[in-house]
Image (cartoon, coloured by chain):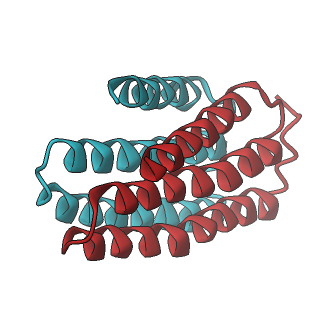
Chain colours: A red, B cyan
Amino acid sequence: MIGMILIGIGVGFVLIGTVGILRFRDLYSRLQASGVSDNAGVGLILLGLIVYDGLGPVDLTLGLLLALLVITNPLVTHAIAKSAFVNRHTGREE
Amino acid sequence: MQIIEALLLLSFLAVLFRLFYGPSPWDRLLSYNAASNRLIGLLALLAVMAGKEFYLDMIIVYAAVSFLGVLVIARFMERGELHR
């Protein structure tokens, strides 16, 4: 039951991030919407799956996937933001 | 349970819209990363709910390869050779 609640909250975060990616008008605003809400959403979904599945060897695999995502997702966001900033992309010149 | 999977799939398709119509290359890269995250969540949900836990190994490999690909493309576009 707690796992279902966590999965529901995570899907809510993912949907809010989708609205942010589709509706924001600036590249850096979209980066913030994606980078914050995706990390929280997918992390909460994986945490909810760990709780939902019960104790077992699957928890280690899910924990490894969760650690990989939590480490690599901010790195990707920072790399995209730095790549756009170095090339003097203001986001509003379209 | 299936409504959660349907919502994730809908979110994945909505992010692909930004991938096709993004104004700048960084928008496309950002939305590719977001779509990859949604696909990872959806596949993990399907693997645990269907009881096929060996799918999770493939999801780990997909997450690592997607991270490397996005990072390499971002660093390549930093040099200005793909800049339009």
Name the side, left or right, on which B18 lies relative to A58.
right
Establish if A60 lies above or below B18. below
Question: Looking at the picture, how far across and down is residue A93, in whole percent?
Answer: 87, 33
Horizontal side of B65 relative to A3 (left or right) equals left
Which residue is depicted at the point 23% across and 43% down? B49
For the point 57% across and 61% down, the residue is B74
Judged left or right of residue B4, residue A80 is right
Q: In this picture, is A39 found above or below B20?
A: below
- Nearer to me, B62 or A62: A62
The quarter of the displayed image where residue A75 is located = bottom right
Quadrant in which the N terminus of chain B appears = top left
Name the residue rendered at 88%, 35% in the picture. Answer: A92
Q: Which residue is drawn at 31% across and 45% down?
A: B45
Number of callouts: 0
User: Is A17 above or below relative to B41?
Assistant: above
Q: Which of A33 and B71 is in front in this view?
A: A33
